[in-house]
Image (tube, rainbow, N blue to C red):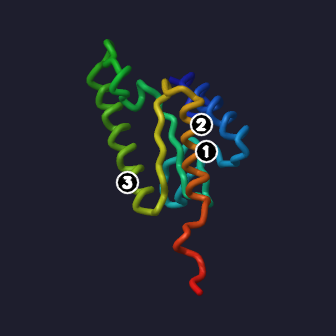
Amino acid sequence: MQAIRSRDTKPERLIRRLVHANGLRYRVAARPLPDLRRTADMVFRPAKVAVFIDGCYWHGCPEHYVSPKTNPGYWSEKVARNMARDRDTDQRLIDAGWLVLRFWEHTPAEESAAKIVQKVEERRRPNSDQGISI
């Protein structure tokens, strides 16, 4: 279990490199909310965007998750708890005004990075209805 990375996985590093090449800066493995004891893989604080790159096994990917052969009760319950925590995290961030982006590790990095760049830039643009009325 010690060898399993909780951050800086290959998919994360590749997506971060592509997002950085598009000129965006972010925090890595940071808490989006100070009182939330959970970290996002990438945090864009001014835009209020939290990005999670979820591993297929640990987060129960519908396409790739296969129940383990050894101690299946424990590991299946562990993955179910992870999935419930993910939903709770999403809801807490949404309630605080954040945009949550989740990608599976098998999603092409270019696709994930393009979506992140698009959403962060959208959130950075000032709304047209917030202008000064004359």
Q: Identify which residue is drawn at 70% across, 41% down.
A: 22
Whether residue 48 sits left or right of residue 83 in the image: it is right
Looking at the rendered structure, the kind of residue marked 1 is: Val
Helix, strand or loop at disc 2?
A: helix
Q: Identify which residue is drawn at 31% across, 34% down.
A: 80
Disc 2 versus disc 3: nearer the observer = 2
Residue 45 image point, x, y percent: 61, 57
Q: Residue furthest left?
A: 73
Whether residue 15 sits left or right of residue 56 in the image: it is right
Residue 64 image point, x, y percent: 38, 20
Q: Which residue is mark 1?
A: 117
Label located before the other in sequence (2 or 3): 3
Find out whether the residues at labels 1 and 2 contact each other: C-beta distance under 8 Å: yes
Does 113 sit above or below residue 76?
Answer: below
Looking at the rendered structure, the kind of residue marked 3 is: Gln
Looking at the rendered structure, the kind of residue marked 2 is: Ala
Helix, strand or loop at disc 1?
A: helix
Label located before the other in sequence (3 or 1): 3
Q: Which mark is residue 91?
A: 3
Whether residue 14 sits left or right of residue 94 in the image: it is right
Inter-mark Cα distance, 3 to 1: 22 Å
Of 110 and 80, which appears nearest the observer? 110
Of 100 and 6, which appears nearest the observer? 100
Q: Which mark is residue 113?
A: 2
